[in-house]
Image (cartoon, rainbow, N blue to C red):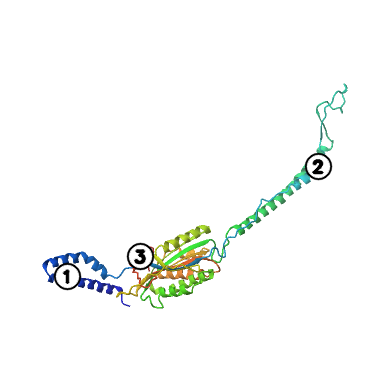
């Protein structure tokens, strides 16, 4: 495939040749006309030079997008309407044992009598009750029964307390286990929590019209992918990762980023932020299919010219939100070699199809329109995090 650099050089040479011929012709005419034309040519020189260059496409002039978001997967937390109350300790054991002990003769309570009396006998009587005082009549055997009853009551309360403590501890433990099961997110096949991951890969595309180019593969997938279902997004994400793996010899730069969250809402916000940042690098989305709806912008009518290159640099980005922490562990490390890129893409291809763990994914790439090309300098202007490998 012919490199665009020699072609650019020829165009510059042609521009100078045109300018030279016009200048020579101007010098052959009258002196005033020659002076005027020479001044005009110098003024128009920058425009001649610019016309000799092919139209340079800034990074992300056109882009493609496919994807969808479908919320929680297999390990999403389910709300629970159960109420958990503190264990109630019945006082029946205490009151029942005490009342039974009191009424069955363990301990004879003294009789407290408040008896105001008007008048009385002038003689002393041991059984007489003074007016307006409290009289206490106790049983001669009351002290013995009181001591015996005290020990029996203490033993009874001790047994009751031990049973209550065991029951209380058992109930608390059961409630804690039930709380964990109902309110804390269960670990799925990929671990606990939610991961938000991103990978960008820059590839050399010698011939974008070739059926084997990554741009042709993405165009085919955009026609067949089912973006209106979770299974369709799982298959699409996995297949794109595999297509990139098949072209690993063309990968020239890559970058990865991942974060792990316990809070699903924070994970969703991070996923949305990354998606917006990546889409903001495109001036227009000439191919955009999201959740089964086509949001594609109108294409600009391409113009035929001598310079119609087929070689370009393409950038493909995968953004996904997925249950568990396995994806985060793999993509959170820095890319240093092609082996790191292979491991990251293999992880995405496998994790995307694990159970119902994939919550959402977006595939973005540039350039999308046929007549646009990118150089590595164009790419690095917008994808500064890419690392050469």
Q: Position of residue 148 (x, y in %)?
A: 80, 42
x 44%, y 66%: residue: 199
Quadrant of image for the N terminus: bottom left
192 relative to 232, above or below? above
| Relative side of 270 to 153, left or right | left
Q: Position of residue 228 (x, y in %)?
A: 52, 69
Work out which residue is located at the far left of the displayed protein and give it. Answer: 31
Question: Observer-nearest residue: 366 or 150?
Answer: 366
| Relative side of 358 to 311, left or right | right
Secondary structure beneath dot 3 equals helix
Residue that badge 3 annotates: 380
Secondary structure beneath dot 2 equals helix
Q: Residues within 10 Å of mark 3 (few under 14, many from 20)?
A: some
Q: Mark 3 or mark 2, which has the lower sequence index?
A: 2
Q: Which mark is residue 96?
A: none
Q: Position of residue 186 (x, y in %)?
A: 58, 61
Q: Which mark is residue 102?
A: 2
Residue that badge 1 annotates: 23
Task: Tell us which disc is closer to us: 2 or 1.
Answer: 1
Work out which residue is located at the far top of the displayed protein and give it. Answer: 122
Question: On the image, which quarter does residue 179 sit in?
Answer: bottom right
x 23%, y 68%: residue: 48
Secondary structure beneath dot 1 equals helix
Q: How far apart are the alpha carbons under marks 3 and 2?
A: 92 Å
Task: Tell us which disc is closer to us: 3 or 1.
Answer: 1
| Relative side of 230 to 303, left or right | right
Question: On the image, which quarter does residue 17 sit in?
Answer: bottom left
Q: How far apart are the alpha carbons under marks 2 and 1?
A: 130 Å
Q: Mark 2 or mark 1, which has the lower sequence index?
A: 1
Q: How far apart are the alpha carbons under marks 3 and 1?
A: 40 Å
Residue 152 in view (yes/no): no
């Amino acid at each position: 495939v012919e490199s665009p650099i020699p072609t650019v050089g020829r165009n510059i040479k042609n521009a100078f040749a045109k300018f030279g011929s016009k200048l020579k012709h101007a010098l052959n005419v009258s002196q005033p006309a020659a002076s005027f034309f020479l001044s005009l040519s110098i003024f128009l020189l920058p425009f001649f030079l610019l016309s000799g260059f092919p139209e340079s496409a800034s990074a992300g002039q056109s882009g493609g997008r496919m994807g969808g978001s479908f919320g929680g997967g297999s390990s999403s937390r389910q709300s629970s309407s159960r109420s958990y109350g503190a264990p109630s300790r019945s006082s029946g054991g205490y009151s029942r044992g005490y009342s039974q002990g009191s009424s069955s003769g363990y301990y004879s309570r003294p009789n407290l009598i408040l008896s105001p009396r008007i008048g009385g006998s002038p003689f002393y009587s041991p059984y007489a009750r003074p007016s307006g005082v409290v009289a206490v009549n106790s049983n001669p055997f009351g002290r013995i029964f009181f001591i015996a009853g005290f020990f029996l009551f203490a033993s009874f309360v001790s047994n009751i307390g031990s049973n209550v403590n065991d029951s209380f501890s058992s109930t608390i433990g059961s409630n804690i286990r039930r709380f964990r099961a109902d309110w804390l997110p269960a670990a799925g096949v990929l671990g606990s929590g939610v991961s938000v991951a991103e990978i960008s890969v820059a590839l050399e595309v010698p011939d974008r019209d070739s059926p084997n180019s990554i741009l042709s593969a993405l165009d085919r997938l955009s026609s067949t992918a089912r973006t209106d279902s979770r299974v369709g997004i799982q298959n699409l994400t996995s297949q794109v990762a595999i297509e990139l793996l098949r072209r690993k010899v063309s990968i020239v730069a890559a970058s990865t980023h991942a974060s792990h969250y316990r809070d699903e809402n924070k994970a969703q916000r991070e996923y949305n932020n990354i998606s917006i940042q990546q889409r903001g690098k495109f001036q227009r989305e000439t191919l955009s299919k999201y959740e089964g709806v086509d949001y594609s912008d109108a294409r600009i009518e391409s113009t035929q010219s001598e310079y119609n290159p087929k070689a370009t640099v393409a950038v493909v980005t995968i953004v996904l939100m997925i249950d568990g922490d396995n994806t985060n562990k793999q993509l959170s490390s820095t890319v240093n070699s092609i082996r790191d890129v292979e491991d990251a893409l293999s992880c995405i291809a496998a994790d995307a199809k694990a159970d119902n763990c994939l919550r959402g994914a977006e595939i973005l790439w540039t350039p999308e329109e046929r007549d646009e090309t990118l150089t590595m300098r164009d790419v690095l202007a917008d994808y500064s995090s890419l690392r050469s490998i």
